[in-house]
Structures are given as C-alpha cells and as structure tokens.
Image (spheres, grey):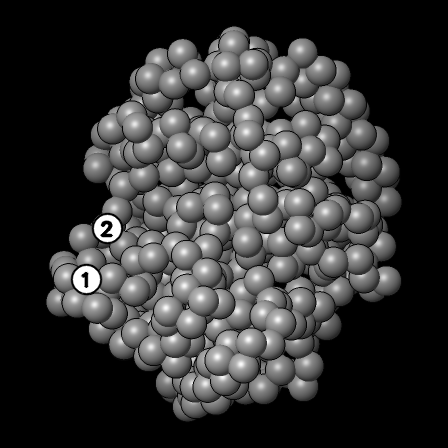
Amino acid sequence: MSHSDELLALSSVELRRRIGSKEISPVELLEAAIGRIESLNPAVNAIAATDFEHARRGAARAEADARKGERLGPLHGLPTGIKDLHETAGLLTTYGSPLYRGFVPEKDAAMVALVRRAGAIIVAKTNVPEFGAGANTRNVVWGATGNPFDPRLNAGGSSGGAAVALACDMLPVCTGSDTGGSLRIPAAVCGVVGFRPSPGVVPADGRPLGWTPISVLGPLARDVGDLRLLFSAQIGMDDREPLAFPLDAEAVAKARPTDLGALRAAVTEDFGQCPVAADIRRVFRSRIGAMRHLFRACDEVSFDFGEAHRCFDVVRAQSYVDRYRDAYEKDPNSLGPNVRSNYEMAARMTLADMAWAHAEQTRIFRRFQERLRDYDIVLSPTTPVSPFPWSELYLETLEGTRLRNYYHWLALTYVITLVTNPAISLPCGVDEHGMPFGLQVIGRFRGDRDLLDTATAMEQAFARIPQLARPRPDLAKLAKPVIDLRSIVTYPPILQ
C-alpha cells in the first residue's frame, strides 16, 4: 500500500488530529484525494463538478494556519464533497438538471457555509439524480453513478455520489440530504453510514416550504465517529430555518459510553406494509440473530402506519407543485420522467388532499411515538432489495407485484421520514449477492445524540462479529474501469 493509500484510509477524526498536530499536511492530503478521484472516478462516476485549483489554495492556507498554531475548526484541512443539490459559491451547481448546467452560485447554502467555516476544503460536487428525485443516481448532465462493489449496479440516491466517494476513500468528508431515504439508502448499498437527523437541526435555507419537515440535510461518513464530526459542523441555529431547535454541537461530536445491554430494541422487517424481498427478509433475520445478545431485549413488534403511502405522496407532492410549476408549464420535457410524473401527480391534488395528509401524518406520528415508549430503538432493513442495475431508472415490480410509483420501493425509509424521528443506516455485512447490507436504526423523537451514542456502540460491537462488520470494495478492480458511466449523457459535455 502506498503512502497516499494509507493516508486516505485514515478516518476523518484521525486525519483532523494529525493535521492539528502537524503530522500531516493538508496539501499532501488534498493531492492524495485528487489522485484517488482521477484514478477511480472513471469507474464509478461519483464526482460531478470539481474545483481543484481553489481547493489547492485553500489547502495551502489551511497548512499555514496549522503551522502558525491558529485556532482550527473541526474539519480543518479535510477535503470535502458537497452534494450537487446544495449551492456552493463559485462552484457549478447543476441539481443534475440541464436547466442548471451553467449555474454557478454567488453564495453558499447555509449548511455549506457552516462546513466551510469549520475548515473544510471544498473539492467537488457529488452526483445526484435530477433534482434529487429517486434513489438511483443518474442524470443527463453527469451520467450514472455506479456502485463501488459492482459499477453495473446502482449506488442508491439521492446522495449516491457522496456515498460512493466515501466508500472509495476519494474524500473523507461528504454532505447529503434526505427526503424519503436519500442519506440512508446510498449509505446502505455502498457500505457506509448515513444519518437522517431531526428536522431543523441542520439549517436548510433553500427549502421553499420551510414549515414542512419532510426534507433534511445531514452527514454521510465511513464510520460513526467521522459522521459525528461532520454533523457537529453542520449543526447551527439559523433564522432562515423555521424548524430550528438547539443541539449542542460539541456534545454531538463526542460519544458517551452506552451499554447496549440496557437497551430494548423493537424489530420489524417491513413496518407492517412496506415491500421487502424474501432474500432481504432472510438476511435481516440472520443479522438480528447475530446481534440479539447485545441488547436487553430484541422483540418483534408490530406498527400501525395507517395510509402512509398515500400520505407520503401528498406531503412530498407539495414541494413539487411549488418548485416546478413554471418549468413544467413552459416545457414539460425540460424535466426528467421522475420529476415530471411527480409534478403531474401533485397538480391533480386538492386542498382536501393536503388537509387529510396533514392529519394522517399527525396520527401516524402519535401512534409511532406511543409504540416507542417501551423501546429505545427500532431496527429494520434500510432497503428492500439488493442493488439492481443503474440502467433501470427505478424498481417497477418486486417479486411479481407491481409497485405504486417510482419511489414505492423506498417505503422502509420514507415511513420514518413521516414520523420525523432521527434514523441512521449502519453497514451490517453483505447480503446473499455479496452486496452491502444496511441496518436502519431509528431513535426516539428528537433523540439525535442518544441515537448516535447507540450507533457508536453498535458499530464497535459489529466490528467484532464477522457477519456484521463493514464490507469494503475492491479498489484495485475499480482502477480498471470497464464501463462508461457517463454514456447516458445526451447533452454536450460541461466545461469544468
């Protein structure tokens, strides 16, 4: 293993420690990251726009500050990827849409500004589905992102590029966001960690419907310690975020000792109504069997999610009516099939639909919180199937049953979106096809810190149980790409 490989394999926490102690140089670390991107990105296409020159200048400043003994932020000198749905000053932000293929924002989104203020070196944007619609990261601007364990298969989404960049050690820090599972799903299928925090903890100043808690910003990482470090930098009270509530960022970064043996875990394969393939059910039962001894109790529990699917349709649709009306009325074909179908479904809805969905979400929320009073966490699969080819835009059928729409297969995560509880996806071995298996762990309402403490303890325990340990992709194979993942691009290439 080369020195660069050894450097990139270090955790963000360790990298930041060594930068602070002057054992490693931010410039050296950045060059290693750029080299890894240039080497492996052709195989997986995780990275969209890049800004290597500005990043190099930032790394040089970071090195100078470290040498002078300046006060350093929690992400000081760490090469960072920002999801291509979030605006970055001076760096192309396309949303995966040809409508924005030349858009260079003048200022950072609130979350990006916090990450930059924490010392992060923004190197690149990470790939997304068009406008983040769907859990298959592909668009006509940048092409498809392939799974690092098999680039012919999808990497999840919508934070797919970020999850792949982390799995391949391209970048130690990557941000994401989550509506129906966009932090949790790509983490699950790429073998990394994705955390959906409580709404309002990370400011989302770009969300037009600010009082709706369906969409949140948050972190992905290679392990829970790294995730806590990034999350602590993303947290911030901001008067542009209507749902904001205070959370101690310094406390979040540090894990408290947690005795798993004192915790009660509720277990469910499908929350009573989510589509899940038989092989994933088998894997999940096997994993629960291997970890059951860790907890005080590990009980199969039934949940009543009512009309969660229809409810999610309506709650989700509101933002599509607001954001895409003008583009659709001007030219429906300017929007991709996922976004277009969402808008058309939303445009048919009525005020009565919205009122019903609000009331149903409230009922679902209250029933779920009542059920959780007897338990500390809920355990479920994160995804219902092993990754399918990225050439399939979405999963149309599951074991012979036609699914309701292009996002119905995400139900395991979007039912939790409706209740707003924090949720994390932890790597938990591989499935029957040799692909990463993700375990979704749901905490109590606004129990972000407690959930992260529990996840830290679970990760440590999993590392000692071979069946549950985090899988790693074969990076040597990825160095020899066999497929052009930008081949689905139908527009002229962008000049970066």
In the image, is 352 to the left or to the right of 100?
A: right
The reply to whether residue 43 is visible in this rendering is no
At 59% across and 70% down in the image, what residue appears? 72
Asked if marks 1 and 2 touch (Cβ < 8 Å), the reply is yes
Tell me if residue 352 comes above or below residue 392 in the rendering. Answer: above
Q: Which residue is mark 1?
A: 478
Tell me if residue 91 comes above or below residue 47 in the rendering. Answer: below
Query: Is 138 in front, or is 395?
Result: 138
Tell me if residue 265 comes above or below residue 235 in the rendering. Answer: above
Give x and y (percent) for residue 250: 66, 51
Give x and y (percent) for residue 64: 50, 84
Query: Is 155 in front, or is 18?
Result: 18
Q: Which residue is mark 2?
A: 473
> Alpha-carbon neighbours of circle 1 within 10 Å: few (<14), some, or many (≥20)?
many
The quadrant of the rendering that contains the N terminus is: bottom left
Query: Is 108 in front, or is 324?
Result: 108
* Amino acid beneath label 2: Pro
At 86% across and 62% down in the image, what residue appears? 239
In the image, is 283 to the left or to the right of 350?
A: left
In the image, is 159 to the left or to the right of 345?
A: left
Q: CA distance from mark 1 to mark 2?
A: 9 Å
Q: Secondary structure at mark 1?
A: helix
At 74% across and 46% down in the image, what residue appears? 247
Q: Secondary structure at mark 2?
A: loop
Give x and y (percent) for residue 464: 30, 28
Query: Is 179 in front, or is 191?
Result: 191
Tell me which corner region of the image, top left, top right, bottom left or bottom right, holds residue 170. Answer: bottom left
